[in-house]
Amino acid sequence: MRSLAYLFLCCVLVLVLGACTTLSTLRGTGDLGVVIERADGAVTLVNTSAKAPYARVDGLGDLSHASVVFSRDARYAFVFGRDGGLSKIDLLESRLVKRVMQSGNAIGGSISQDGRIVVAQNYVPGGIKAFDAETLELLSEVPAEYAPGKFSKVVGLADTSGNRFAYALFDAGEIWVSDFSDPKHPTTKKFPAGKNPYDGLITPDGRYYLAGLFGEDGIAKLDLWQTEKGSSKILENYGRGEEKLPVFKMPHLRGWSLAAGRAWLPAIGRHEVLVADARTWNEVARVQVKGQPVFVMASPDGRQVWVNFAHPDNGWVQVIDTLSGQVIKTLQPGKAVLHMEFTPRGEAVWISARDDNRVVIYDTRSFEQIGGFDVKAPSGIFFTTRAARIGF
Amino acid sequence: MKARLYLLLIAMCCAGNSSAETFVPVSPSEMTRLVRQDCGSCHGMKLTGGLGSPLTADALKGKPAEALTATILYGRPGTTMPAWKSLLTVAQAQWITARLLEGFPEEVR
């Protein structure tokens, strides 16, 4: 009788242990990502292999202009909210690990080369703040005080080598490069940019910082390998003095604009993508597109560039072939397309259609829709591949 | 409230079609969405400001309605504020101004 009881106990034990193992099944994060639900202060966690969401984390505040960077182990997502909230999310345990309110009005952030410092860029109070990526403890800050008592909104923050961060000052028309190799005592170098830089990018090799200008036709360029040479301008006067169209939404720049040896950049107030040679930085072509470009994103192999547009043309997406420089496909993924993100090797692209409350997934060769799912007012889509990319 | 909506609709019909664009919001809910989402891309969905200035009732207190309507329609040269006259009628801009001054309604989703 007693041995029977033991046998029973053992069976129970085996079952319980089995269940525990299933719960803690090991997995990587390379095919995971985050979709921002901009209206609800939540993020949907997604799996690009399953082409489906797997969890949701809420309580993240105002995410109406949210961006995400990943820890270098690609396990944690740092979400920067409009209200200055900085949230750290565990993609494996699907939970909010920590959240701090770091400013009154923020626009995004970046993570250092060594993965130890997360930096937020702020509109109010204008400047950047550095946090310990582990604890979110404030390490130091660089107020964007460009004249006594005057603080600028900070745009286009991007990381580069040596735990340096480059960013642009919208109100001051300057590019600043802050070195956080001593995280508590950053040092900053300043360079002229031009009138009203609206966003910036770092090339995938970390060498060039480009700041798009709103107040004039042109793009400011700084060689981060030899900053002593100072900044200069490229694509000057691309508007040729013509009156530009009203800009209903600012374009966004990130390091995915480089493809096939060329930089593909949104023109301000024009229905054009500007193409510059990525060695000489001279303009080599322009591509006429459906509307004013917002995101101009190269696929991981650089074979295609996908473009979405500002209101009222935000129901369209166009695909440019980077060899021919021609638009080869025009798609209507849904109402109010806000963002696009390629899967790690680019066989598919995920597109958010805010007013359809839907994320749609396209095959990048056939341009067929191969999936999709409902999610409330989706905006930014961010995959963990960004964890290992300079400037993301 | 209902009477105001009818007035708005009549006013919008009288103002005529000022735009050849694809999207002209007509219903109050579409207008609310336009302001929260599309004005919101610079001013913030909660209108607390971003690249654009805050548009909360507090922030706009004391500003004359005509000036705000003019800003919506004609933009502010030298800043990032565009002219919306190609997308919005005068009546629609006035409707937005009035709602902003009293505290803009939430989007009903």
Image: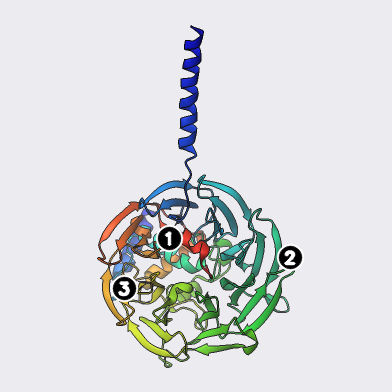
Label 2 and label 1: CA atoms lie apart by 34 Å
Q: Disc 1 marks which residue?
A: A379
The image position of residue A148, as x and y in percent, is 73, 79
Label 3 and label 1: CA atoms lie apart by 20 Å
Q: Earlier in the sequence, mark 3 or mark 1?
A: 3
Q: Disc 3 marks which residue?
A: A319
Check disc 1 and give the amino acid type. Answer: Ser
Check disc 2 and report its element: helix, strand or loop. loop
The image position of residue A108, as x and y in percent, is 55, 65
Q: Earlier in the sequence, mark 2 or mark 1?
A: 2
> Residue A316 appears in which quarter of the rendering?
bottom left
Crowding around mark 3 (Cα neighbors within 10 Å: few <14, some 14 to 19, many 20+) is many
Report the mark closest to the observer, 3 or 1: 3
Q: Are tags 2 and 3 found on a single chain?
A: yes
Q: Earlier in the sequence, mark 2 or mark 3?
A: 2
What residue appears at the point 32 percent right and 82 percent down from the top-left corner?
Answer: A325
Answer yes or no: do the residues labelled 3 and 1 have beta carbons within 8 Å?
no
